[in-house]
Each structure stands twice: as structure tokens, then as C-alpha cells.
Image: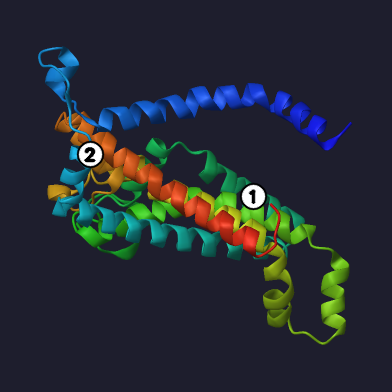
Amino acid sequence: MTAKGQGRTAFAYLAPALLVLGGLLAYPIYQLVLISLYDYGQEQVSGGAPLEFLGLGNYQKLLGDQQFWGVFGQTVAFAAVCVVGTLLVGAFLAILATRVRTWVRMTLFLAALGAWSTPAVAGSTIWLFLFDANFGFVNEVLGIQGFSWTFDKWTAFGLVAAQVIWCSFPFVMVTLFAGIKAIPGEVLEAAALDGASAFRTAWSVTLPLLKPIILVVTIQSIIWDFKVFTQIYVMTNGGGIAGRNLVLNVYAYQQAFAASEYGLGAAIGVVMTVLLLGITMFYLRALRRSGEVL
């Protein structure tokens, strides 16, 4: 079979999956973009007023809003802290898992699986109980009863970031652990015979071999943490006092459903989608330039 024929056969096998993805992703994104171009509020939803085409009006209003830029900056900073924290914790535990006994490693993986499988709402509620100002276990241990972790803007963001890292690190840990175990032992033995220290081996041998995997988990973490909604909404009661702990997803929800500005909320969703696609394309392009294959 020629290469052209093989390509057609591969496309035929992929066609059903592409149709499903088109239905689940392409059409909703199309509707999101379409709604963002109209003045689409509660009156339009109920049929009490006709649709008014605004074109890029919602985007102009959004980009000229100081609150949007403030929330955008908070979202980027919050996501960066969560991504870096998740990668550091996951990488540390992955390395630790390669150096401990089997039963310790299995215990670690089971504990991580529990954190990974806990629903976001349940996990956020448990953390609120643990850090409760009057009856929380953490305040009891630290001897600071009456201290509210969610009242101050920065402690609230820190608490939510810790919860996000707690439920996200298992993916990074397991993925990096699998990558480390897949490195041929002969490569590490050769580095040891050449007199390379443990740090030198990790930096010059292990890290370059793990680069494709690190890029993948970084992309996944950025996408997940940039669009965090549940943890912020539950743990700060909808975005904190006077919206001090808003991120873009919660801000879009407030604009669309609390303020009934569905067109403006859709515009925020489109901006987020474009940003995440841009980040993904940047990393994939960097990966291709480095000559690595996923």
C-alpha cells in the first residue's frame, strides 16, 4: 500500500473520533463565539427583546474594563504558582518513589490516587473544614484559633493554590515516575562509570530524556490551573469579599449568570480559549524545534 493509501486508511479509522470531537468541541466553541458577538442578556433569552449584533463590541468593552485586566493578572499569577508548585511537588515525589521500598511506593501511590480521585467540590469542602477559623484541625495544631484563612486576599489565594496542587500533583508524579523508570539503566550506568555525580547525571542525562514528558505535564497543568473554577468558587464563596479572589472562569460566570450578560461572559470564554490554544501551540512548536517527538 502506498503512503497516500495508508493516509486515507488512517483517516478512515480516525473519522468517527473526529466526528465526536467535532460535536463535543467544535460546535460549542462556535456557539460561544456566536453569542459573544451579540448583546445577549436575560431579555433576549426570554424573548422580550430582539438580538442586537455588536460585532466586537463585547470585546472592546472587556478590554477597556480595568476589572478584567485586574482579574486577568490575578489569574496568570495564580496559575503560575499552581503550575510551579504542582511540578515541584510531583517531581520530588516521583524521584522519591524511585528510591524507596515497594510497599512505601505503593502507599504513596494509593494516597496520591485518593487525592486525584476526590471530586473538586468534596476536596474543597474538606479543606475548608480543615482550615476552619474556629474548629479547624490546622488552627488547632498551630494554636491560632479564630484566624480566618479565607478572609485575607492572599491567604485565601494561598489556601486555594495549596488545594489545587494537592489534587493535581498525582498526575505529574505518576507520569514522571513512569518516564524515569523508562530510562535505560545502561545510560545511567555509563554516566556513573564516567565519574558523573548524581546531580550531574540528573541534569545532563535524566532531565534531557524527560523533556518531552515535562513539556506534556506542563501544558496540562497550565490548561487545568488557568481555568480553575470549582476550588475558587467553593473556598472563597464565589470570588471572595468584593471579588478580591476572582479568576477569569469565576469572573465569566458572574458576568454571564449573576449579571445576565451572557454575551460578555461568552467573550471572556473566547479570550480564555484563544490564550490556552496559544500557550499549547507555543509549547508544541518549541518541542518540535528541539527535535523531540511526543
Residue at 30%, 51% in the rendered image: 136
Residue receiving disc 2: 56
Q: Which kind of residue does numbered mark 2 sit on? A: Leu
Q: Is residue 59 visible?
A: yes
Residue at 58%, 22% in the rendered image: 19
Q: Where in the figure is residue 196, as x and y percent of width and height?
A: 78, 84
Tag 1: Cα neighbours inside 10 Å, few (<14), some, or many (≥20)? some
- For label 1, the SS is helix
Q: Is residue 221 visible?
A: no
Residue receiving disc 1: 109
In the picture, measured across the screen, residue 76 lies left or right of residue 86, that is left
Marks 1 and 2, how far apart at CA = 49 Å
In the picture, measured across the screen, residue 127 lies left or right of residue 52, that is right
Q: Identify whether 250 is placed above or below 34.
A: below
Residue 202, picture quadrant: bottom right
Q: Where in the figure is residue 226, as x and y percent of width and height?
A: 39, 50
